[in-house]
Amino acid sequence: MTVYDRWHKSHPEPGEARCSEHKRVPTAKHGQGVRWQVRYRNEKGEQHKRNFEKKADADRFDVTRRADEPRGEWIDPKLGQTRFQVYAGTWMASRLHKPGTATTYAGHLKNHINPVFGLVPLLSIRPTSVQRWKQVVVIDRRPMLAPPKTRASIRDVPVPAVLADALAEHIDRHKPEDVLFRTTRGNLIRRDYFNADILKPAILAAGVPADMTFHDLRHTFASTALAEGVPISEVSRWLGHESITTTVDLYGHLVPEASNRARTALDNAFAAVSGLT
């Protein structure tokens, strides 16, 4: 038995007086604090105790602990203050995973889970916390994705209305907490799957060169924006170039009309000045 009555003796001496309320032999702590106490030992053999106002709550805690402990599922409430990333590291080290599985799990923890829950105590993480965890939030037609690896990679990019509408329709068909894109089987999309099952078929259907890569879409975006007169400084910022010189070197040839526009601007300026003389 691990549920104890703090107010009454379990093995009273013959003839000891009983309390008027419960008709049992009182202890020195009778009427002080809460009555019921559960005592247990953790995985290190150290004894702990937890007090309860009601015996039903104490029994429930004890039954749950006894059922979960043999399966390794019971967690000492005091360990609930441990931060998630500390527990995750211990969990990874205590499990026997295949090398590929271990690498995958480590990547998920580093890139996706720890940035959100790493510093949160275990007891503060509830199912609702996970359900509210969204990878994408659309603000003013700008998808704000999960944090990338470096601060320099955090930037806004323009999203055309046709894409924003398509994304909104796609999101409406799924739960808000779901990953934005999945495979036909509902799994996360990996690079090899994307290249073989999504990008390559799209390339064939579009009739573009078969050696086109996903990175080429970045060049398409930049060249289209510049051809439509978007300032190269803005394009450089969207591409994440540290220096606009990089953008000019790569895409400067796509703005051949820049010098003509400059001459026209100067002519207009001088024409206005000439009209005042």
Image: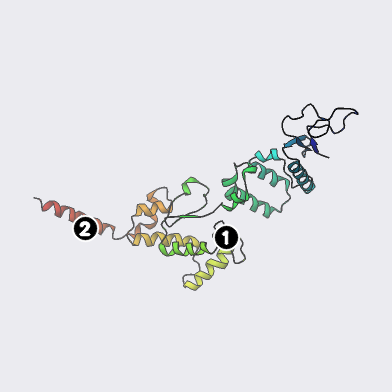
112 left or right, relative to 21:
left
Q: Where is residue 81 in the image (x, y as percent from the top left)?
A: 65, 38
Image mark for residue 150 = none
Q: What element carries label 1?
A: helix
Q: Where is residue 134 in the image (x, y as percent from the top left)?
A: 54, 53
- Which residue shows up at 67% across the image and 41% down it? 80
What amino acid type should be assigned to the residue bearing mark 1? Arg
Q: How many marks?
A: 2
Is 72 situated above or below 7?
below
Is 153 situated above or below 19?
below
- Which residue shows up at 67% across the image and 51% down it? 102
Contact (CB < 8 A) between labels 1 and 2?
Answer: no
Tell me which numbered mark, 1 or 2, is placed earlier along the sequence: 1
Q: How crowded is mark 1: few (under 14 residues within 10 Å), some or many (20 or more)?
A: few
Q: Name the residue under label 1.
A: 191
Q: How crowded is mark 2: few (under 14 residues within 10 Å), some or many (20 or more)?
A: few
| Residue at the outermost front position | 20
Q: Position of residue 171 (x, y in %)?
A: 51, 61
Q: Name the residue under label 2.
A: 264
- Which residue shows up at 76% across the image and 46% down it? 64
123 left or right, relative to 135:
right
| Residue at the outermost top position | 28
Given residues 84 and 154, the one toward you in this image is 84
Quarter of the image containing the N terminus? top right
34 left or right, relative to 205:
right
In 3D space, how far apart are the residues under numbered discs 1 and 2 (Cα atoms)? 48 Å
Q: Position of residue 194 (x, y in %)?
A: 56, 63
